Image (cartoon, rainbow, N blue to C red):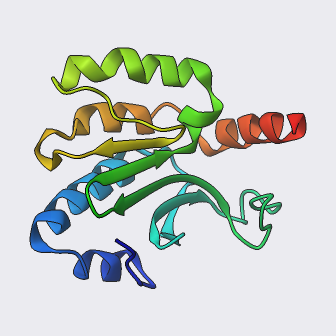
Amino acid sequence: MTIEAKTPDEYLEKLPKERKEVISKLRETVKNNLPRGFEECINYKMLGYVVPHSIYPNGYHCDPKLPLPFINIASQKNFVALYHMGIYANPELLDWFVVEYPKHVSTKLDMGKSCIRFKNIYTIPYQLIAALCQKMTPQEWIALYEKNTKKS
């Protein structure tokens, strides 16, 4: 489900009621737990949390006009998604998350490279998402991003 919005609040306003509550709670969890320096925005038609150009002027290598993406939240057709680029780029962080997930949720982890899919919106592990958000500062993300993009 693609949502056309210019601001995070507009994005939320366009969601169905049951998704609005869940996405709002997920948004607050991320905002309240990300280290200082990340900024909230709309990018890729989702709620985004990025390293702004004021901190990382190079921007995203695919399109340097865009800030460096880190986390996105989206209401998809059949699930709520949390995209976390740090999990994709850092195997240790991924391993930590995979071990911690079953301690919070009884259902199987449904995950792609950076996408965590929540098909059951009533079992989103907000405490685990909060802990995940606290694990990487903008400076740590920039260093990891640069290390990984130099390999390619």
Q: Position of residue 56 (x, y in %)?
A: 76, 57
Residue at 22% x, 35% y: name it.
125
Q: In this view, does 5 lie above or below 52?
A: below
**Quarter placement of the N terminus:** bottom left
Q: Where is residue 76 in the image (x, y as percent from the top left)?
A: 33, 62
Residue at 82% x, 42% y: name it.
149
Q: Where is residue 152 in the image (x, y as percent from the top left)?
A: 87, 39
The outermost residue toward the front is 78
Where, by quadrant of the figure, is residue 108 drawn? Answer: top left
Pick whichever, 33 or 99, lies toward us. 99
Q: Is residue 66 above or below residue 110?
A: below
Pick whichever, 87 or 25, lies toward us. 87
Q: Position of residue 23 (x, y in %)?
A: 25, 60
Residue at 80% x, 67% y: name it.
64
Left/right of residue 63 with respect to residue 95 in the rendered view: right
Q: Is residue 60 above or below residue 87?
A: below
Left/right of residue 90 with respect to residue 48 in the rendered view: right
Left/right of residue 137 with respect to residue 25 in the rendered view: right
Q: Is residue 54 above or below residue 34?
A: below
Residue at 21% x, 55% y: name it.
25
What is the number of callouts on the image?
0
Pick whichever, 94 or 79, lies toward us. 79
